[in-house]
Amino acid sequence: MKFRKNIFSPRLIKGGSKSYSSFSNARKCEIDGIKFASQAEGALYVYLKSQYDKIFCQPKVYLTKAEILYKPDFFCDGIYMEMKGRESVPWRLKRRLWKFYGPSELHVYKMKSQPY
């Protein structure tokens, strides 16, 4: 009997320093006691902290009457902010839904890759 490799199971990563997703190579970080899913997200937090007084991390936003949950990375002064490394299929769908059902503006930031 042959076994096929399950491509949908999450990859096991030793040390726990990387993200749990096999899609992303993001490295987790912690700034001011707040844990972030990637270093790019942490860098955006540091930038926003210098610009705004109050920053809310991972606010819950429900899109459409079906209440599709989306959590942008940050909320400051009526503007939602998102840091993206790679764009996934669910993200593209939620970005299109945001245009019609989002409560306010959504600013999307992309981090330029750093040379080794």
Image (cartoon, rainbow, N blue to C red):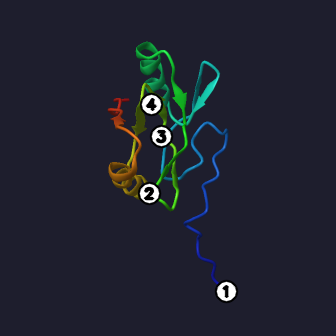
Task: State the image coordinates of residue 100 (x, y, percent, origin top left).
Answer: 34, 52
Q: Tell which tag, 2 or 1, sits nearer the viewer.
A: 2
Contact check, label 2 and label 1, Cβ < 8 Å: no
Give the number of callouts: 4
Is disc 3 placed on a helix, strand or loop? loop
- Kindly identify the residue that appears in the image at 44 percent across and 17 percent down: 52
Q: Residues within 10 Å of mark 3 (few under 14, many from 20)?
A: some
Q: Earlier in the sequence, mark 1 or mark 3?
A: 1
> 51 left or right of 20?
left
Q: Amino acid at mark 3?
A: Pro
Q: Earlier in the sequence, mark 4 or mark 3?
A: 4
Q: Nearer the viewer, residue 26 or 80?
A: 80
Contact check, label 4 and label 3, Cβ < 8 Å: no
Q: Which mark is residue 90?
A: 2
Q: Tell which tag, 2 or 4, sits nearer the viewer.
A: 2
Residue matched to label 4: 40
Residue matched to label 3: 72
Is disc 2 placed on a helix, strand or loop? helix
